[in-house]
Amino acid sequence: MYKSEKAKLWFYLILQLSIIIAGLIAVLEKNWTSLGMTILTLLVVNLPSIFERRFKIVIPDVFEVVLVLFIYAALFLGSLHEFYFKYWWWDKALHSVSGLILGNMGFLIVSFLNEESKLSVKLSPAFVALFSFMFAVTLGTIWEIYEYTMDTLFGFFMQRGSLDDTMTDLILDTLGALIFAVLGYFQQKGQINVVSKFLVRMEDEQNITG
């Protein structure tokens, strides 16, 4: 566990150092758009650890690394360094995993509701899976709106000027969300144990199960 935490710490330090260096370069070049993007990226990559402490949740190390890398690849490399423009497959690669990540977030929300002592409602595995799926698809759609906004207002090329690109992204988001929802459903039924290393949990639940 010590080695795992140490490796994660170095991972965060290297990522954040690269973002800070990019911000300093943006200041020297007086590129305020790039500076704004580096600040946004720096804030967002720290959200998982902030949420973990603030809302008393347990984010598995493997999933936290995947999530932070996804944010870094989307905002820092994709938008700031124009990887969306340089590599045609960059956007598709991110959307291939975004549905899985967002589906996990949907499961976290429902887990919170199930564990909330003030609520007398106990949600079924089927409803949890459905909510996870719909949550992921909805956020995937919001992301497409974000890409359109960035392209229109700031001249990025995230959507590659194509309706086909947008629809392909939404299809990939939906497939990823569906896969995680199905796996999560059978996980709750106790029939498989595939997503446990990636599933975000409430802190109390971790104490009970661990």
Image (cartoon, grey):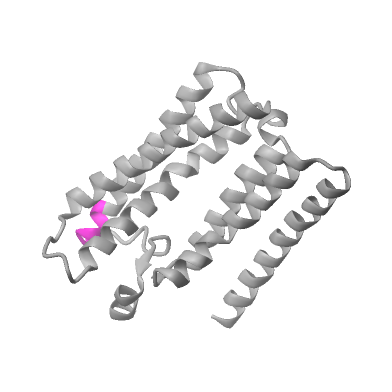
Q: Position of residue 70 (x, y in %)?
A: 57, 49
Q: Nearer the viewer, residue 120 or 192?
A: 120
Decide if residue 146 is in sight here.
yes
Q: Position of residue 116 (x, y in %)?
A: 22, 68
Residue 110 in which image quadrant: bottom left
Decide if residue 191 is in sight here.
no
Identify whether 134 is placed above or below 87. below
Identify whether 104 is placed above or below 6. above
Image side of residue 73 versus residue 119, left or right = right
Q: Where is residue 205 in the image (x, y as percent from the top left)?
A: 30, 73
Identify whether 155 is placed above or below 60. above
Q: How many marks?
A: 0
Which corner quadrant holds the N terminus? bottom right
Which residue is depicted at the point 43% across and 37% down?
140
Residue 13 in which image quadrant: bottom right
Which corner quadrant holds the C terminus? bottom left
Q: Which of 59 and 2 is in front in this view?
A: 59
Image side of residue 122 versus residue 135, left or right = left
Which residue is depicted at the point 19% across and 49% down?
127
Q: Where is residue 52 in the image (x, y as percent from the top left)?
A: 46, 68
Which residue is depicted at the point 32% across and 62% down?
193
Which residue is outermost to the right?
Answer: 28
Q: Which span is picked out in magenta?
A: 185-191
Which residue is depicted at the point 76% across and 42% down?
32
